[in-house]
Amino acid sequence: MHHFQYQQNELYCESVPVSVIAENVGTPCYIYSHATLTRHYNAFYNAFESMDRLICYSAKSNSNKAILNIFARMGSGLDIVSGGELYRGLNAGFSSDHVVYSGVGKRSDEIDYAISSGILMFNVESVNELELINQRAKNLNKKVPIALRVNPDVDPKTHPYISTGLKKNKFGIEIDAALEAYKAAYEMENIDIVGIDCHIGSQITQVKPFEDALSSVKSLEEKLRSLGIKIQYLDMGGGLGITYFDESPPHPDEYAKALIKNLKDLPVKLILEPGRVIVGNAGIMVTRVLFRKTGQIKEFTIVDAGMNDLLRPTLYNAFHAIESVRKFEGEPVKTDVVGPICESGDFLALDRYIPNVKNGDLLAVMSAGAYGFTMSSNYCSRPRAAEVMVRDDQYHIIKARETYEDLIRGESLPAFM
Ligand SMILES: *Cc1c(COP(=O)(O)O)cnc(C)c1O
């Protein structure tokens, strides 16, 4: 459930008409609903009520400071995948001992930053990385808490680009090699083994892959226990999907139930790293129609948002519902909704039936709260969009639209020219 609803044919975010924001802030812009964000976080957190747990919101799904601050205030932890996300997280109010750090390619400077900050644990994705962390920890005279991210080889049945738990994926340590890697970690002087981690993919719409991953992780935990290696944290990653089109992903309660029933009697603290399921449906992107164009075989609706603003349709062939901000009567038309960028891959929707909009009308691209703004770029020297948060009848610009000056910031001419 989200708080983007029509009242008298006008799309509202909570109690604010979307058209008012578009008028005052300009387009394209992202709009997030505070009530939806808190509601989704609570639903997820409460689903695991019977467990000792820490929810580590996945920063990369939406890392705006105001969004991060909402979750920090609610007691959430943070899942990061870069030094930049650590910086953002600490700046937005997370305490460092609530931060877990995943990612296959951590640099030394990022590792040092995380060690010095005192994060909860590193989710280590290779033996090479483990060795580097041990060495950096030694330099800093620290003993560093780690989990190994294991790759359980389960098929999450999602888009290939967002499946991460298969043997052919670059992520984690293959489950068959995990025991040896743990033994190696156990011998390392500056490494403290505290957990097991896995994250099998994103936009997963069934519970089965999670259950399979958990069973794999559990048998590893047993083996570790028999070797005297005690695990405090079991991190099952993120990945729970949302409804973009006609998917029917499990409710967090159902997902929780499936995990909890297999976790009873295990004296571990459960960590989860949800991203999309918390923020995905809590945001929309609003764009204005620039032109209509009728070709011999296609009808085009050209809007002022492109693949640089919302990459998911281009990258994953992802579906986002497109609604007219003002509802009106009349036959829908079949059209490609395309952006201004010089790429044929620059589309928000293909062969889609949408209301018969005119130049200047506003469209809302739904479910754009996750992997929307965070994946945006300046391609074609397009300033990045503004981001707005709504709470009840108020709204606030949580990120100003970039300016032309922003585009060239940091660029300079060499003296030898
Ligand atoms: C991206 C990511 C997540 C979040 O995934 P969602 O599908 O948005 O829930 C969690 N953990 C790790 C390691 C990730 O890379």
Image: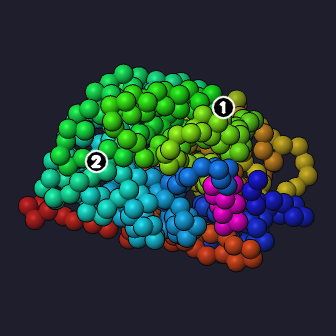
**Residue closest to the eye, 312 or 259:** 259
**Count of labels in the image:** 2
Q: Is there a contact, CB below 8 Å, between mark 1 and mark 2?
A: no
* Residue positioned 22% across, 65% down in the render: 412
**Whole-percent x and y of residue 137?**
19, 53
Residue 85, placed above or below residue 69: above
Question: In the image, which disc is placed on residue 206?
Answer: 1
Q: In this view, does 301 lie above or below 207?
A: below
The dot on residue 399 is: none
Quarter of the image where one finds residue 249: top right
Q: What residue type is labelled 1?
A: Gln
Q: Tag 2: residue type? A: Asp
In which quadrant is the C terminus drawn?
bottom left
Residue 180 appearing in the image: yes
Pick whichever, 187 or 286, lies toward us. 187
Report the predominant secondary structure element of the magenta stretch.
helix
Is residue 299 among what the camera can see?
no
Q: Which mark is residue 192?
A: 2
Which residue is more in the foreground, 345 or 164? 164
